[in-house]
Image (cartoon, rainbow, N blue to C red):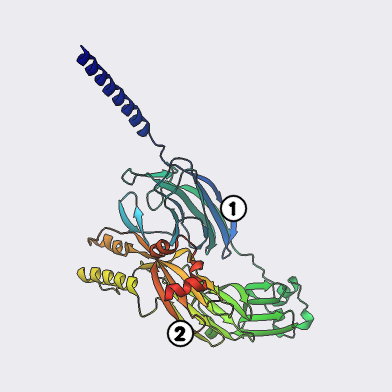
């Protein structure tokens, strides 16, 4: 009898434990809320002027559960130049026309038909908000269609993507989008506007200017007017005319440049740094030229656009690119206007380990498929379009994103390609930038630097102690 009671007690205990385990399992298997992107706001003007910059800001919140990753996508149907002003995400990239992008309908990469910007956040936590701010310059009069969407990747669900909006017109990748439009109008035409009219409108005393050009009509001009100087550049009958007044000296100088002295494209703006005037000329969405003018307005040509300027007036610039090429490779150069000497610093020989290995992989692929292309032709973009500098250590740094999708360019040519490994971000750090003959650099994957120093801004690598440690 006693033995029977013991058996019954043990049985009841086993049932109790099993019941508790089932309740606990029920708690652990409670459905997790999937992530969900909500487009909070899209800020942009209703009307803009051709060849003039506007700013677009998109804000997205994940109001669902944690996402493995998420992205904000903005694409443009018209001929525009777009650059990233700010993105508080893991990564943000501009994809020009012809870039290889993923098609949600064809389930493979395809060449893009129009410009796309994507801001990628990994992971995208529940209730977190991220923003993408863009600078846009339209080049044609009419209506620009701007397509906005956001996606969230569900964790542990075979890469399932939840898109916002759920319905609507489809973009080039086959995702529903919210469609916005802005009207681009022509620049106002001043048929009777002369150089003298423009100077007078800007408060300039014409009695101090002795020139026969005041009554000439001026076209496509740009004006810079602040407490230190007044400068106007525009097209007169004889070419591009530049008038410069340094207000502290109260002295005018001017120069007319003929077509043989000008870069290609058309004038879009004026800026200056210390003793040099910078005139920007636009050719296409991937090609901008800078004309640097010295104190006496002597021209220096720069085949690209300015990224940063050191205190000694050494300029860091982005080389122009072939806009309609299917592959885009960034080029970074420096130029010292005092000694009229410049040099490309990216890519810079001798190449280091990561780049050499990347070229080796591309070369092997091209040789295998008898592709007659330069093995150095692959996508490598300047991340966020940003270069950081340090004047005290004469150093600079930037991140290059190597896009392994160069392989998928051949998908539409019925060439089998390996599985796409995605992107690799590599940091390039340079020192002795103030002496072109002694410039040295280091190439280090960003993941290695984060493992070594933590997730810090790349500007921290340029401080003396850390810079010396990296180069030792």
Which residue sits at x=57%, y=86%?
338
Q: Secondary structure at mark 1?
A: loop
- 174 vs 218, left or right, is left
Considering only vertical position in the picture, is 127 above or below 290?
Answer: above
Considering only vertical position in the picture, is 46 above or below 356?
Answer: above
Q: Is residue 222 visible?
A: yes
Q: In the rendered image, which residue does mark 1 sit on?
A: 46
Reading the chain from its start, which is encountered first: label 1 or label 2?
1
Q: Nearer the viewer, residue 325 or 162?
A: 162
On the image, the x and y values in percent for residue 219 come to 62, 74
- Marks 1 and 2, Cα distance to the nearest angstrom? 51 Å
* Crowd tier of the residue under label 1, counting other residues whose Cα lies within 10 Å: few below 14, some 14–19, many 20 or above: few
Q: Nearer the viewer, residue 291 or 392?
A: 392
Question: In what quadrant of the picture does the N terminus appear?
Answer: top left
Residue 115, picture quadrant: bottom left
Q: Which mark is residue 438?
A: 2
Q: Secondary structure at mark 2?
A: helix
Which residue sits at x=50%, y=78%?
264
């Amino acid at each position: 009898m006693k033995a029977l009671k013991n058996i019954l007690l043990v049985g009841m205990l086993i049932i109790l434990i099993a019941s508790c385990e089932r309740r606990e399992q029920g708690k652990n298997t409670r459905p997790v809320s999937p992530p969900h992107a909500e487009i909070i706001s899209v800020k942009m003007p209703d009307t803009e002027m051709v060849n003039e910059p506007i700013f677009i800001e998109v804000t997205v919140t994940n109001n669902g559960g944690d996402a493995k990753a998420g992205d904000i996508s903005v694409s443009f149907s018209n001929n525009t130049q777009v650059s990233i002003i700010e993105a508080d995400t893991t990564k943000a990239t501009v994809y020009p026309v012809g870039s290889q992008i993923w098609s949600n309908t064809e389930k493979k990469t395809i060449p893009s038909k129009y410009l796309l910007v994507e801001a990628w956040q990994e992971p995208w936590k529940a209730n977190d908000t991220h923003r993408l701010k863009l600078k846009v310059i339209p080049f044609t009069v009419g209506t620009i269609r701007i397509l906005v969407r956001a996606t969230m990747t569900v964790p542990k669900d075979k890469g399932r993507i939840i898109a916002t909006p759920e319905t609507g017109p489809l973009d080039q990748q086959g995702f529903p989008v919210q469609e916005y439009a802005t009207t681009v109008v022509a620049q106002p035409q001043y048929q009777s506007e002369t150089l003298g009219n423009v100077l007078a409108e800007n408060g300039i005393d014409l009695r101090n200017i002795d020139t026969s050009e005041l009554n000439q009509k001026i076209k496509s001009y740009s004006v810079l007017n602040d407490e230190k100087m007044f400068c106007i550049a525009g097209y007169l009958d004889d070419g591009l005319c530049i008038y410069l007044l340094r207000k502290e000296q109260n002295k005018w100088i001017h120069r007319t440049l003929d077509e043989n002295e000008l870069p290609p494209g058309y004038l879009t703006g004026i800026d200056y740094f210390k003793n040099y005037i910078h005139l920007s000329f636009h050719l296409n969405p991937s090609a901008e030229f800078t004309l640097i003018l010295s104190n006496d307005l002597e021209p220096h040509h720069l085949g690209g656009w300015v990224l940063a300027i050191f205190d000694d007036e050494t300029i860091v610039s982005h080389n122009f690119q072939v806009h309609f090429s299917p592959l885009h490779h960034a080029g970074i150069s420096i130029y010292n206007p005092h000694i009229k000497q410049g040099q490309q610093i990216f890519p810079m020989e001798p190449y280091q380990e990561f780049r050499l290995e990347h070229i080796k992989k591309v070369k092997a692929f091209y040789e295998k498929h008898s592709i007659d292309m330069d093995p150095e032709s692959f996508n490598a973009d300047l991340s966020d379009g940003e270069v950081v500098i340090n004047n005290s250590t004469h150093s600079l740094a930037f991140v290059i994103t190597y896009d392994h999708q160069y392989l998928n360019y051949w998908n539409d040519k019925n060439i089998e390609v390996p599985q796409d490994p995605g992107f690799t971000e590599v940091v390039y750090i340079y020192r002795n930038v103030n002496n072109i003959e002694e410039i040295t650099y280091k190439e280090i994957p960003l993941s290695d630097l984060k493992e070594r120093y933590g997730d810090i801004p790349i500007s921290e690598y340029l401080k003396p102690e850390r810079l010396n440690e990296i180069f030792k």
